[in-house]
Amino acid sequence: MIGNQTKGRGFCGLLNYLESQKDAKLIGGNMGGDNARALAREFKISRQLNLEADRVVYHASLSLPENERLDETTWNELANRYLEEMGFDSNQYVVYRHSNTQHDHIHICASRIRLDNGKIVHDSWDYKRSKTIIRQLKRDYGLQQTHSSHEKLSRNPSIGQQKRLEREHEEYINGERLTPQERPIK
C-alpha cells in the first residue's frame, strides 16, 4: 500500500473532485451528508471552531498494488485506524473509494480542526508517521509489503547502469581502460 497526503484550504474543491470521478463511491466517515455540497456545509461546522487556521483540509489517499483488493468494510476499518493513529480521533472525515485506475484505492477527506477543542491536528513529522502507520497496517491486514524510498536506493542497477558496467568491463579487458568498472553508488 502506498500513501499520499496533502493539506489545503477549501473543502469544496476536494469534495467535488472526489465525487466527480467515474465510479466514485462514498463508503464511510462520520458525517451525515451524501454529496459534496452537503458535506462541505457540514465541514463548515469544524471551520467555525478555529477561524484563524489556514490549511484545515487534510487529504490522504491509500492505494494498493494492482493485484490486491479490499472490500468496503475493510477499507473503512483501515481508514479509521489510519486517521486515529495520525491524530484525527476527534475530527470530521469522509472516505471515498475510486475505481478509475488499475489500483484499488481510497481518498480520505478530513478536517484538521478537532471537534473537542478546536485545535489543529499537529502535522510535524506526518510523512514519517504516515509511512510507519502504513507499514503496520500492511502487516496487520496481510497486505503486500512494498519497499520504502530508502530501501529502493539499494536496488539492483537499472538497465542503463548495467549496460555501462558491461561496456566498462569490456573496455578494461581490451586494455582501453586502466581501472576496472565501479558499481553504481546506489
Image (tube, rainbow, N blue to C red):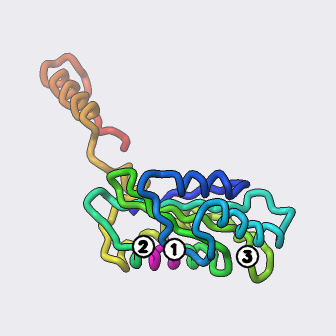
The residue that label 3 is drawn on is 114
Q: Which residues are magenta?
A: 75-81
As helix, strand or loop, the secondary structure at mark 3 comes to loop
Seen from this angle, which residue lies furthest left?
A: 174
Q: Residue at x 31, y 66 (%)?
A: 69
Residue pointed to by mark 1: 28
At a point 62% along the width and 64% down the height, the residue shown is 125
Q: Earlier in the sequence, mark 1 or mark 2?
A: 1
Q: Decide which of tag 2 and tag 3 comes sooner along the chain.
A: 2
Amino acid type at mark 2 = Trp
Query: How far separated are the C-alphas under marks 2 and 3?
Result: 23 Å
Element type at marker 2?
helix
Residue at the top extreme of this rendering: 176
Decide if residue 12 is on the left or right side of residue 117.
Answer: left
Can residue 170 be seen by looking at this rendering?
yes
The reply to whether callout 1 and callout 2 are in contact (CB within 8 Å) is yes
Measure the alpha-carbon separation of dots 1 and 2: 9 Å
Front-lying residue, 109 or 123: 109
Q: Quadrant of the C terminus?
A: top left
Mark 1: few/some/many CA within 10 Å (<14, 14-19, 20+): many
Residue 109's x, y, as percent? Answer: 59, 64
Q: Where does residue 81 sit, x and y in percent of width and height?
A: 51, 78
Circles 2 and 3, Cβ within 8 Å, touching? The answer is: no
Residue 105 placement: quadrant: bottom left
* Amino acid type of the residue tagged 3 in the rendering: Arg
Mark 3 or mark 1: which is in front? 1
> Which is more foreground, mark 1 or mark 2?
1
Q: Which residue is mark 2?
A: 75
Query: Residue 122 location, x and y as percent?
Result: 70, 69
Magenta stretch: dominant SS? helix
The residue drawn where x is 68% and y is 67% is 111
